[in-house]
Amino acid sequence: MAKLKGAVTVDTERCKGCDLCVVACPQDVLALSKDANSKGYNFSMAINADECTGCVTCAMVCPDACITVYRVKVEHAA
Protein backbone atom coordinates (compact mmCIF):
# COMPACT_ATOMS: atom_id res chain seq x y z
CA MET A 1 0.00 0.00 0.00
CA ALA A 2 1.25 3.46 -0.87
CA LYS A 3 1.98 5.93 1.87
CA LEU A 4 1.35 9.65 1.43
CA LYS A 5 4.26 11.99 1.94
CA GLY A 6 3.69 15.71 2.23
CA ALA A 7 5.65 18.90 1.91
CA VAL A 8 4.55 22.24 3.36
CA THR A 9 5.56 25.65 2.04
CA VAL A 10 4.69 28.88 3.84
CA ASP A 11 4.64 32.32 2.24
CA THR A 12 6.55 33.90 5.11
CA GLU A 13 5.85 37.48 4.03
CA ARG A 14 2.08 36.93 4.10
CA CYS A 15 2.06 34.94 7.36
CA LYS A 16 1.00 36.96 10.39
CA GLY A 17 1.90 34.30 12.96
CA CYS A 18 -1.64 33.55 14.15
CA ASP A 19 -0.51 30.04 15.24
CA LEU A 20 -3.68 28.32 13.94
CA CYS A 21 -1.73 26.00 11.63
CA VAL A 22 0.68 25.03 14.41
CA VAL A 23 -2.20 24.02 16.68
CA ALA A 24 -4.10 22.22 13.89
CA CYS A 25 -1.21 20.06 12.64
CA PRO A 26 -1.67 16.49 13.92
CA GLN A 27 1.98 15.61 13.20
CA ASP A 28 3.58 18.65 14.91
CA VAL A 29 5.28 19.66 11.68
CA LEU A 30 4.87 23.41 12.06
CA ALA A 31 6.09 25.95 14.61
CA LEU A 32 6.45 29.70 14.79
CA SER A 33 9.87 31.00 13.86
CA LYS A 34 11.91 33.10 16.24
CA ASP A 35 12.74 35.29 13.23
CA ALA A 36 10.28 37.89 11.97
CA ASN A 37 9.20 38.81 8.47
CA SER A 38 9.39 42.37 7.09
CA LYS A 39 6.10 43.24 8.83
CA GLY A 40 7.41 42.14 12.22
CA TYR A 41 5.43 38.89 12.54
CA ASN A 42 6.91 35.60 13.66
CA PHE A 43 5.98 33.41 10.71
CA SER A 44 5.13 29.73 10.63
CA MET A 45 7.70 27.25 9.35
CA ALA A 46 8.11 23.49 8.96
CA ILE A 47 10.44 22.28 11.70
CA ASN A 48 9.62 18.59 11.42
CA ALA A 49 9.09 18.33 7.65
CA ASP A 50 9.80 14.59 7.42
CA GLU A 51 6.68 13.85 9.48
CA CYS A 52 4.28 15.65 7.11
CA THR A 53 1.61 13.34 5.69
CA GLY A 54 0.04 15.96 3.41
CA CYS A 55 -3.25 16.03 5.34
CA VAL A 56 -3.77 19.73 4.36
CA THR A 57 -5.26 20.65 7.75
CA CYS A 58 -2.79 23.51 8.17
CA ALA A 59 -3.72 25.03 4.82
CA MET A 60 -7.45 24.76 5.52
CA VAL A 61 -7.25 26.67 8.81
CA CYS A 62 -4.91 29.41 7.53
CA PRO A 63 -6.97 32.64 7.34
CA ASP A 64 -4.49 34.28 4.96
CA ALA A 65 -4.01 31.33 2.57
CA CYS A 66 -0.23 31.43 2.90
CA ILE A 67 0.28 27.66 3.19
CA THR A 68 0.62 25.29 0.25
CA VAL A 69 0.76 21.53 0.78
CA TYR A 70 2.14 19.11 -1.79
CA ARG A 71 1.43 15.37 -1.65
CA VAL A 72 3.16 12.43 -3.30
CA LYS A 73 2.61 8.71 -2.98
CA VAL A 74 5.63 6.80 -1.76
CA GLU A 75 5.70 3.15 -2.78
CA HIS A 76 7.48 0.79 -0.41
CA ALA A 77 9.06 -2.34 -1.80
CA ALA A 78 8.16 -5.51 0.10
Image (tube, rainbow, N blue to C red):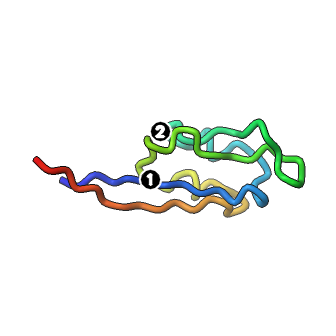
Mark 2: amino acid: Gln
User: Residue 9's image quarter?
Assistant: bottom right
The residue labelled by disc 2 is: 27
Find residue 25 and report its image quarter. Answer: top right
Instruction: Name the mark on residue 9.
Output: none
Going 67% across and 63% down the picture, which residue do you hit? 65
Instruction: Specify the farthest residue to the left.
Output: 78
Q: Earlier in the sequence, mark 2 or mark 1?
A: 2
Name the amino acid, label 1.
Cys
Asked if labels 1 and 2 touch by Cβ distance under 8 angstroms, the answer is: yes
Dot 1: what SS? loop
Left or right placement of residue 55 versus residue 30 in this view: left
Quadrant of residue 10 in the image? bottom right
Which residue is tagged 1? 55
Residue at coordinates 22% horizontally, 56% vertically from top-left? Answer: 75
Return the x and y of residue 74 as percentages of the image width and height. Answer: 28, 55
